[in-house]
Amino acid sequence: MNTRAWIVFLDESGVSLLPQIRRTYSPRGRTALLRHRLNWKRASMAGALGYHSTDPDRGARLCFHLKPGSYDTAGLIEVLEQVKVFYRGERVVLVWDGLSAHWSRAMRAWAAEQDWLTLERLPAYAPELNPVELLWSSLKKRELANLAGDHLADVADATEQGIRRINANPRLPWSSLAHTGLTIRPPHPPNLRKDQ
């Protein structure tokens, strides 16, 4: 693996017009009611959260994609094309789970033609190792909590607002990585200057 690369964790999650029900406050004697139309329309979101392997001062970077329906191999290749543009062709080591669309024959053939991309697989049944999972949790507990939208555009707007909140707080992506127990350390000891 090239040590001058972005380590990028990618994960997908679903959202729908059915609200994410969370506890809330209401005036004493008035039970909070959540009214919605029982609409089952769904959208999928993909997040790619990257950390530079040799230069943590470059910060964490979050690339986000939202689409109606669910992801298949073609949809994920579209997401990876966006990731390529987002990282401006720099080397990327992509870490994701064992979803069948991630390791399909078409995906492996496409990835083999990409000189900027290396694919790595998370251990099976280990979502706790993917920091993007924690960002989804944050988004669903804040911006999407108790949201009873009439259209997928309402969910998309709230989701984009949450992504802006996450991007505005540079500590949040790093704390998500720390919560997984994973670290990214530069190749030189921290007590030495880079030129030593």
Image (spheres, rainbow, N blue to C red):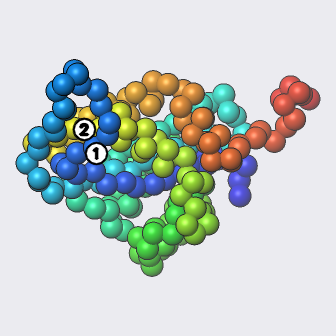
Whether 187 is drawn above or below 14: the answer is above
Which residue appears at 62% of the width and 42% of the height? 179
Q: Is residue 163 left or right of residue 52?
A: left
Q: Quadrant of residue 122?
A: bottom right
- The amino acid type of the residue labelled 2 equals Asn
Question: x and y percent of residue 40 in the render?
Answer: 15, 57
Residue contact between numbered discs 1 and 2, judged by CB atoms under 8 Å:
yes
**How far from the left and from the top, in percent, is residue 121?**
59, 65
* Quarter of the figure with the N terminus: bottom right
For the question of whether residue 84 can be seen, the reply is no
Give the quarter of the figure containing the C terminus: top right
Identify the residue at image location x=24%, y=38%: 146
Q: Which residue is mark 2?
A: 146
Residue shown at the point (57%, 69%) measured from the top left:
124
Quadrant in the rendering for residue 79: bottom left
Q: Residue at x 87, y 35 (%)?
A: 189
Residue 119, image x and y in percent?
Answer: 57, 63
Q: Secondary structure at mark 1?
A: loop
Q: Position of residue 95 (x, y in %)?
A: 57, 57
Nearer-the-camera pick, 157 or 106: 157
Dot placed on the residue nearer the N-terminal end, 1 or 2 = 1
- Residue at the spot of label 1: 20
Most distant residue in the top direction: 27
